[in-house]
Image (tube, rainbow, N blue to C red):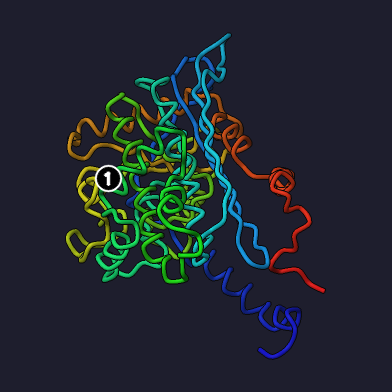
Amino acid sequence: MRGSLVEAARAKRELIRLFIERIRRGERPATNVRLYDLPPRGGGGRGIPHAAEDGGSRVEDFEAYTLYIARGWAASYEAAGGGYRVSFEAEYSDVGIVLPQAYSEERVRLYRETLEALAALEVLPRIGGGLLLWDGSLRPLVAKHRPGASEAGMAEAARILRDRLRLDLEEALGELEKLWAQGEAPASPGLIASRLEVEALGDRDYVWVALLEWAEKLLAVKRLLESAWRAGVTPLFITKTSRSTSLFGGILPDVYYLKRLRRFDPFRTEHRILRGLEEFRGVEKGSLRGPLLPVEAGLDEFYRERLGLAELYVRLDAGAPILKVEVAFDAGQADPGRLEGLVERSVEALQGLPRARGYPLGLSVAHRRARLAGGDVERILAVLGLELERSGRWML
């Protein structure tokens, strides 16, 4: 409507309030969703080997360029004195200029996820047979398309990458792994800079650059999950504020209906099994067409055929938030009976970990260590000599 925001709010107030009330009165949770009681079990003293990770990223826009800052942090925990202590920690960080500048926010998220996966990979040897806690959902981590992607554009992007870098995508991923081994991550910007002058990158180069960055993230997550399974580690992806509607299929998030069914007591839902990328994206098996994933480095086969997850909701403590938990498993090695036991053991192990307000304490620590506060950004800009630089959005 023509006018101010306050005028718009006043005009829409009754309509919005009526809409909210109708949703609250009219929406009824499905009755076929099974909930199971969880017996009270305090965490902190069972000596469960585990690790937790998180990451943070930021973009700073200046008049002529965009600066990115990204960090991934992970730590392993061991039993000590009736509780736990950090036995090993790994941190990966990067600062640079987003080149080309198209889709900068989305591409910096890829950098951060790559750093998170590599940091988590480094702590895996410390928690054989334990749990790896990842902050966030597995489904968007692996099921999103690359920035600026089109289904028909994969082959063209790969062709341009080969022409520009004199490497095909398979060879480029091999070079990235060599750079990881030297401690450089994300390695895509460094590989590109080693073969092209900055001035040689034009606006349209984002098509193949984003393909390389996206494939690097997918490869890092693949390496993490494969290494975890070999080590007998169970990867758990935990979301505290899930907006998923996959359980009830309602207009509001699943957690809204779960709170109406079970307001206070600890519980868990029946788990749901998803196998492969089609089911992660919520489409019919076999209906995805075209080269949506690179075949190089086994990425297509891994994400379509091998990767599975069991997803469920839990409330670990009375009155605590409801968490969405995804258990990542090797779909090529798991039968229904084993999966049932894996889910049960995962929930029991979560209950045995130290928690703060129903949330694993290790993830809370990882969040504090990985997040980028304003002071962190100011220090980085000072180190770079950019603290007095005008941003791209400064006003007279």
Number of disc labels: 1
Q: Nearer the viewer, residue 10 or 57?
A: 57
User: What residue sits right under mark 1 in the picture?
Assistant: 273
Measured along the vertical axis of the image, is residue 314 above or below residue 394?
Answer: above
Other-residue count near label 1 (Cα within 10 Å), few / some / many at <14 / 14–19 / ≥20: some
In the rendered structure, which amino acid carries the disc numbered 1? Ile
On the rendered image, what quadrant is the C terminus found in? bottom right
Q: Nearer the viewer, residue 293 or 343?
A: 293
Q: With 349 as the anchor, is 9 left or right in this view?
A: right
Determine the image quadrant of residue 34: top left
Counting from the top left corner in percent of width and height, residue 77 is at: 51, 21
Counting from the top left corner in percent of width and height, residue 63 is at: 68, 67
Counting from the top left corner in percent of width and height, residue 104 is at: 52, 62
Q: Residue at x 44, y 60 (%)?
A: 28
Determine the image quadrant of residue 278: bottom left
Q: Nearer the viewer, residue 82 or 264?
A: 82
Measured along the vertical axis of the image, is residue 124 above or below residue 66?
Answer: above
Q: Residue at x 22, y 30 (%)?
A: 338
Q: With 106 as the anchor, is 340 left or right in this view?
A: left
